[in-house]
């Protein structure tokens, strides 16, 4: 009995050691979630992406970068196709009709109420943001594709752009000095002003941080849950749990369709809300 326990301990230690030595090879779940330098099309093969160096800086094309280009190209083609349909008739049909419904919804239910007067100049950016996030989220549900919004670098980039647009809007409306002065409500006691100024200044950065983390966490969590449910079949080494695992995985997959739409809506709505708060600080 004692010898058996020692053997188990040695085996566990060897496993931990090999795992630590091979930390560049993530688990099979994280392999599907994290970025990489190849795209697996099992059982048809693997597409290896090129490694590029520029002045000693690694600018290699990764899996997520590749699918960013794919989503952007697809979005451009869909937009051009819809725009061409209006050349022959003012009554949209097909994809143009579908896009018009979404555009009107984003305009009338998100951008206009949140930003108010002058919302027209922000509408192109808000529509681009909404459609890019929505298409990226949905693309992650396609076999062999990747969820680029499950990469925190992508969501952080989107949040930083929204942060820049928000601050520019406020400074353009009030001027730089008055914009920062208006962060602290007038009529505050002198002793409280430094505290309120610090809180408001921190709040400027916590807003885009929340945008970044919310989108990233929601998109990663759904995929991890799906792979975890499917992984129960292999962990338990039995097909008995397959109907339950596959059934729940399909349910989560359908739920991900709703989450993809909700997250695009929430990110766009909060961005419009932050812009509106910066432009109309008196309210």
Image: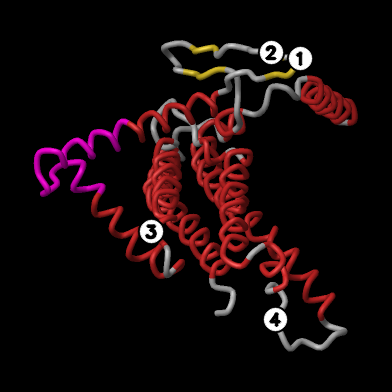
Give how far apart the Cα atoms at labels 1 and 4 are: 49 Å
Given residues 107 and 50, the one toward you in this image is 107
Residue beneath label 2, please?
A: 53
Residue beneath label 1, please?
A: 56
Tell me which residue sits at (71%, 84%) in the image.
186
Q: Which quadrant of the structure image shows residue 166?
A: bottom right
Given residues 271 and 189, the one toward you in this image is 189
Give how far apart the Cα atoms at labels 4 and 3 are: 28 Å
Residue 95 in the magenta stretch? The answer is: yes
Give how far apart the Cα atoms at labels 1 and 2 are: 6 Å
Disc nearer the start of the sequence (1/3): 1
Residue 104 in the magenta stretch? The answer is: no
Q: In this view, does 32 lie to the left or right of 140?
A: right
Where residue 68 appears, as percent x and y from the top left, is 49, 31
Which disc number belongs to residue 120? 3
Give how far apart the Cα atoms at labels 1 and 3 are: 44 Å
Q: Can residue 251 be seen in this view?
A: no
Q: Which quadrant of the structure image shows residue 237?
A: top right
SS at badge 3: helix
Pointer 2: residues within 10 angstroms few (<14), some, or many (20+)? few
Q: In which quarter of the image is the C terminus?
A: bottom right
Where residue 244 appears, as percent x and y from the top left, is 42, 44
Give how far apart the Cα atoms at labels 3 and 2 are: 42 Å
Where residue 138 appears, as percent x and y from the top left, is 40, 41
Tell me which residue sits at (47%, 53%) in the image.
263
Dominant secondary structure (helix, strand or loop) of the stretch shown in magenta: helix
Disc nearer the start of the sequence (3/2): 2
Which disc number belongs to residue 185? 4
């Amino acid at each position: 009995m004692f010898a058996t326990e020692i053997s188990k301990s040695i085996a566990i230690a060897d496993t931990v050691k090999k795992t630590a030595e091979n930390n560049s090879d993530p688990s099979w779940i994280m392999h599907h979630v994290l970025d990489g330098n190849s795209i697996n099309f099992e059982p048809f093969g693997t597409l290896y992406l090129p490694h590029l160096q520029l002045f000693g800086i690694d600018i290699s094309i990764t899996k997520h970068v590749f699918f960013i280009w794919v989503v952007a190209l697809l979005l451009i083609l869909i937009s051009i196709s819809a725009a061409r349909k209006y050349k022959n008739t003012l009554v949209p049909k097909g994809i143009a009709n579908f896009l018009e419904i979404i555009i009107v919804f984003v305009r009338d239910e998100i951008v206009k109420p949140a930003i108010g007067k002058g919302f027209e100049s922000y509408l192109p950016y808000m529509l681009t943001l909404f459609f890019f996030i929505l298409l990226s989220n949905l693309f992650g549900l396609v076999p062999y594709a990747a969820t680029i919004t499950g990469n925190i670098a992508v969501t952080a980039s989107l949040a930083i752009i929204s942060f820049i647009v928000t601050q520019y809007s406020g400074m353009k409306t009030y001027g730089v000095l008055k914009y920062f002065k208006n962060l602290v409500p007038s009529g505050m006691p002198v002793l409280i002003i430094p505290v309120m100024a610090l809180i408001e200044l921190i709040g400027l950065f916590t807003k885009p941080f929340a945008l970044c983390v919310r989108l990233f966490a929601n998109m990663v969590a759904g995929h991890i849950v799906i792979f975890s449910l499917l992984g129960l079949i292999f962990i338990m080494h039995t097909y008995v749990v397959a109907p339950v695992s596959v059934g729940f995985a399909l349910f989560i997959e359908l739920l991900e369709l709703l989450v993809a739409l909700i997250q695009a809506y929430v990110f766009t709505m909060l961005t419009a809300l932050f812009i509106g708060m910066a432009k109309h600080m008196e309210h």
